[in-house]
Image (cartoon, rainbow, N blue to C red):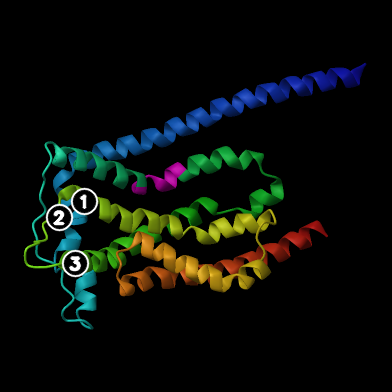
Amino acid sequence: MIKPIKNNEQAEETDMSFFDHLEELRWHLIKSISSIVLVAIVLLALKSFVFNYIIFAPLGESFPTYQVFQQILPSFKPPEFVLTTVEFGESFFVHIKVSLWLALITAFPFVFYQIWSFIKPGLLENEKKAARGTVFVCSSLFILGVLFGYFIITPFGITWLGNYSVGPQAINSPTLSSYVSYLTMFTIPTGLVFELPIVVYFLARIGLVTPQLMKKYRKHAFIIILVLAAVITPPDILTQFLIGIPVFVLYELSIIIAGRTHKKHFQETD
């Protein structure tokens, strides 16, 4: 008599927990989106600071990257051109776009914390212990990747693309929208690429990736990394290697992480 009651109660609790999870997911999404919107509103109000000291900074010779690399390459200077707006309302919509992207970068730790807060209750106790510090590590890697893209890839990309010419009849006069699009492409995808060790860690935890597999396909990975670098950077060999080398280092680091994770997983199951 007691067992059927318990089973019914468990079924009701399962049904309730499913809808509770949906409700919880909704609130996590609302908090994440709200944080991005609030930060974007603040950035909209700081228009002069955002554009003068962040967006347009890589166009000035005083940018730290130019100062450092000019010690090695004296000719490494930003191109001289004036950004134009050719569409009605382009400045306004670019301003909104910039604010949203910067808000996403700024609020990424909080957004990822909300995602992790939703996932964490479904993990086993040993999985929670193994994944301790995930929010900090993921956020740090993403921010590090964005900064790498901003301070390293962006100046080289701007210099190469801005100075490239097919003839005196074609004068480089990029639009504000295209400049911001390339700036976005140089930074946010790089931040996502830097999450490779975390992705490998979780794939190793569930057994989809092993260190032996990663070592076996190391050469293939190197080619894929170069292709990926060619996609998210301008067709400049130097810039491609600037993004390719750290990603390959992350790949080698991921092999070590996969090895330790795989070994620890087997120790726990024994």
- Could you tell me residue 16's position as x and y percent? 66, 21
- Nearer to us in this view, 114 or 242: 242
Asked if the residue at tag 1 contacts the one at tag 2, i.e. Cβ–Cβ closer than 8 Å, the answer is yes
* Left or right: 167 as drawn, with respect to 13: left
Asked if the residue at tag 3 contacts the one at tag 2, i.e. Cβ–Cβ closer than 8 Å, the answer is no
- Could you tell me residue 41's position as x and y percent? 25, 36
Q: Name the residue under label 2.
A: 174
> Which element type, helix, strand or loop, lies under badge 2?
loop
Give the quarter of the image for residue 154. Answer: bottom left
Q: Name the residue under label 3.
A: 63
Instruction: Write the start and end of the magenta stretch as one range.
Output: 105-111
The kind of residue tagged 2 is Pro
Q: Name the residue under label 1.
A: 178
Residues at marks 2 and 3, CA–CA distance in whole angstroms: 20 Å
Instruction: Categorize mark 2 by other alpha carbons within 10 Å: few (<14), some (14-19), many (20+).
Output: some
The kind of residue tagged 1 is Ser
Would you say residue 18 sits in the magenta stretch?
no
Residue at 31 percent of width and 45 percent of height = 101
